Amino acid sequence: MPRATILIVEDEESILKLIKYNIENAGFKTVTVSSGEAALSSAFKIAPDMIVLDLMLPGVDGMAVCRILTRDERTAHIPILMVTARGDDSDIIAGLEAGADDYITKPFSPKVLVARIGSVLRRSRKPAGSLAGAGDVSIHGIRINTDKHEVTVAGELISLSVTEFAILEFLCRNPGWVFSRNQIISAVKGEDYPVTERSVDVQILGIRKKLGLRGKYLETVRGIGYRMAEGSDEA
């Protein structure tokens, strides 16, 4: 199996070298750039398996890069791990709203960084269907193809981030069941994953917007969490 290629976007040379060394030492291939413009050019050109993206960049910043890549169908499937010097919930939520799949704050442990990369890659290559049963799923006109990692709504393809895909599939495979925010995160990312409840709300909001009219079936249960409404498939 070919080694995964990680695009590293970092403008501080010392941190760039640290990230590159540890990622390559873990068996991955790397491509490095130091600006948002170069990140966009490289992402479209080489289609990496994953992007490690610093948010504080000269020129086009990391937030803008993230938004552009996650909204373009050519790159929307590429998972993004954002690196931020700020640990405030507001900054983390902003990154997730921009489309990032995971985050790590500076200063970070190289071992934790590599572990996060491995976790994100596993989720992107083996989506949430493995957690709840094999095969595709269809409900309310929402059709999820786990092999192709695609979602169509009324026959039209929509672009979801890795995390959005995993959450939607998990809920669609368990219609009628109400899950807390912590249960949703545990199901798609593993136990004790460090994430705020607000970030789950952000992901759900993003999914609803992309589902359009069928977003109404992704219901909020006040005081508990979320569920996919029961029902049969519809065209």
Image: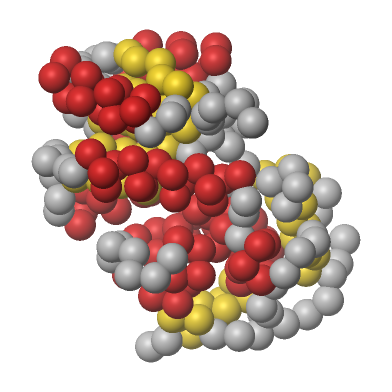
Q: Where is residue 13 in the image (x, y as percent from the top left)?
A: 16, 15
Give the position of the C terminus as an image quadrant: bottom right
Left-right relation of 233 to 27: right
Q: In which quarter of the image is residue 134?
A: bottom right
> Quick one: which residue is furthest to the right in this view?
235
Regarding residue 186, the answer to whether it shows in the image is yes
Q: Residue at x 53, y 48 (%)?
A: 122
Q: Which residue is drawn at 47% across and 32% down?
A: 50
- Residue 19 vs 147, above or below: the answer is above
117 or 70, which is in the foreground?
117
Q: Which residue is drawn at 46% across and 11% down?
A: 41
Left-right relation of 153 to 51: right
- Residue 60 vs 167, above or below: the answer is above
> Quick one: which residue is furthest to the bottom in this view?
223
- Residue 31 vs 222, above or below: the answer is above
Give the position of the N terminus as an image quadrant: top right
77 or 152, which is in the foreground?
77
Q: Which residue is drawn at 56% across and 45% down?
A: 124
Q: Where is residue 96 in the image (x, y as percent from the top left)?
A: 36, 49
68 or 112, which is in the foreground?
112
41 or 189, which is in the foreground?
189
Q: Where is residue 82 in the image (x, y as percent from the top left)?
A: 31, 39
